[in-house]
Image (spheres, rainbow, N blue to C red):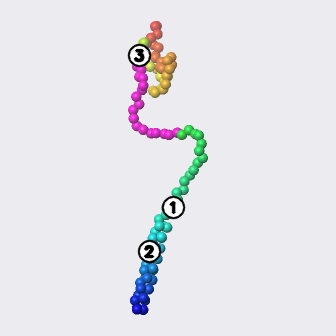
Amino acid sequence: MTTGTHSNRKRNVGLAIVLILVASTVAGYFIRRREIPLVVETEKVALRNLTEVVLANGKIQPVVQVTINPEVSGEIIALAVKEGQLVKAGDLLLKLKPDNYIAG
């Protein structure tokens, strides 16, 4: 009977060693698996304007398009505005060479 008790004790010690090894392996896995904390920058809340720049390709269509017809024809000698510039009624747009419309 001592042989049976001795083999049970050996088996229990072996089982305990195996359980300890398995437990330490699992614990090591979970300890190494922990994520490294993210470093973030924080800022106090404040009211301010945000500027967002969008670069895009496309074609812009005007809301209103106006065709200009002069009362007299002639050679353009100066342009007073650039393409796309805002103009108001009465603004000078261009100058014509006066030879064609001045009586002489």
Crowd around label 3: few <14 · some 14–19 · many ≥20 (10 Å):
few
Disc 2 vs disc 3: Cβ atoms closer than 8 Å? no
Report which residue position mark 3 lands on: 69
The amino acid type found where label 1 is placed reads Ile
The amino acid type found where label 2 is placed reads Val
The amino acid type found where label 3 is placed reads Asn
Report which residue position mark 2 lands on: 22
Q: Is residue 20 above or below residue 74?
A: below
Question: Where is residue 11, by image quadrant?
Answer: bottom left
Q: Which residues are magenta?
A: 51-68
Crowd around label 1: few <14 · some 14–19 · many ≥20 (10 Å):
few
Report which residue position mark 1 lands on: 36
Image spot of residue 87 (x, y percent): 49, 22
Image spot of residue 78 (x, y percent): 48, 21
Per the image, label 3 sits on a secondary structure element best described as loop
Decide whether residue 61 is among the magenta residues.
yes
Query: Is 6 situated left or right of 47 in this image?
Result: left
Q: Is residue 52 above or below residue 24?
A: above
Q: Identify which residue is drawn at 46% across, 39% down.
A: 54
Query: Is 28 situated left or right of 44 in this image?
Result: left
Crowd around label 2: few <14 · some 14–19 · many ≥20 (10 Å):
few
